[in-house]
Structures are given as structure tokens and as C-alpha cells.
Image (cartoon, rainbow, N blue to C red):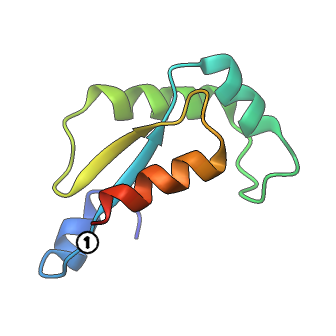
Amino acid sequence: MESIEEIESKFGDCAYKLFTLITKNEKTLGERILDETRSSGYRNVKDGIKINSDNQMRELYKAESHILIDDKTPEEVALEIESLLV
């Protein structure tokens, strides 16, 4: 899949939920993007900040929830996602 917009066309007749993790803290986002211990390999801070900002400004997609990750541990984020699955 090339973009998030393709989800509806590919999986529209399936039950799914989409979770987009966002942050209000650009400094933390930049640090996370540059952290070489993270497996994604994505290291473009400028684009990452733009994507994060765009995600916050646009309307939610069908079945999408935004998860604000500021000041949360990965475990807390996982629990929040889990609570939205029920």
C-alpha cells in the first residue's frame, strides 16, 4: 500500500480499526526519529514533523482514532489501544 487512503479501498468490507500515534512535542518526535535503536530506519525529522502535524489537522479516516502519546510509556499506549478494541 502506498498511502493510508488506500485502506478503505483495499479493506472497506472488513472490520478494522486504524490507530494513528501523534505527539504535540516536536522535540521528542525529532529525538525518536533520530534514535538509531528504533527499528524503522526512518530518520527524516523535517518530514516526520510535517506528517505528524498533517495527521493532527486532517479529518479522521473511517474507523481511525488518534492516540496522543505524550508522556506515556509504550505500555500505556498499548493499553489505550487495547481499550479501544472492545
- Look at 64% across and 48% down and name the residue there: 74
31 left or right, relative to 13: right
34 left or right, relative to 22: right
* Most distant residue in the left direction: 13
x, y percent for residue 31: 77, 29
- Look at 69% across and 36% down and name the residue there: 44
x, y percent for residue 81: 42, 55
Q: What residue type is labelled 1?
A: Tyr
Quadrant where the C terminus sits is: bottom left
Q: Nearer the viewer, residue 7 or 84?
A: 84
Rendered image quadrant of residue 10:
bottom left
x, y percent for residue 23: 52, 28
Q: Can you say whether 39 is above or below 21 in the image?
A: below
45 left or right, relative to 50: right
**Residue 48 makes an appearance in the image:** yes
Q: Can you say whether 25 is above or below 21 in the image?
A: above
> Where is mark 1, residue-wise?
16
Badge 1 crowding class, 10 Å Cα cut-off, few under 14, some 14 to 19, many 20 or more, is few
**Residue 3 makes an appearance in the image:** no
Q: Nearer the viewer, residue 84 or 17?
A: 84
* Most distant residue in the bottom direction: 14
Query: SS of the residue at dot 1?
Result: loop
* Most distant residue in the right direction: 37
Q: Which of 4 and 15 is in front in this view?
A: 15
**Looking at the image, how many numbered discs can be counted on the residues?**
1
x, y percent for residue 56: 35, 29
14 left or right, relative to 6: left
- Look at 57% across and 46% down and name the residue there: 76
Quadrant where the N terminus sits is: bottom left
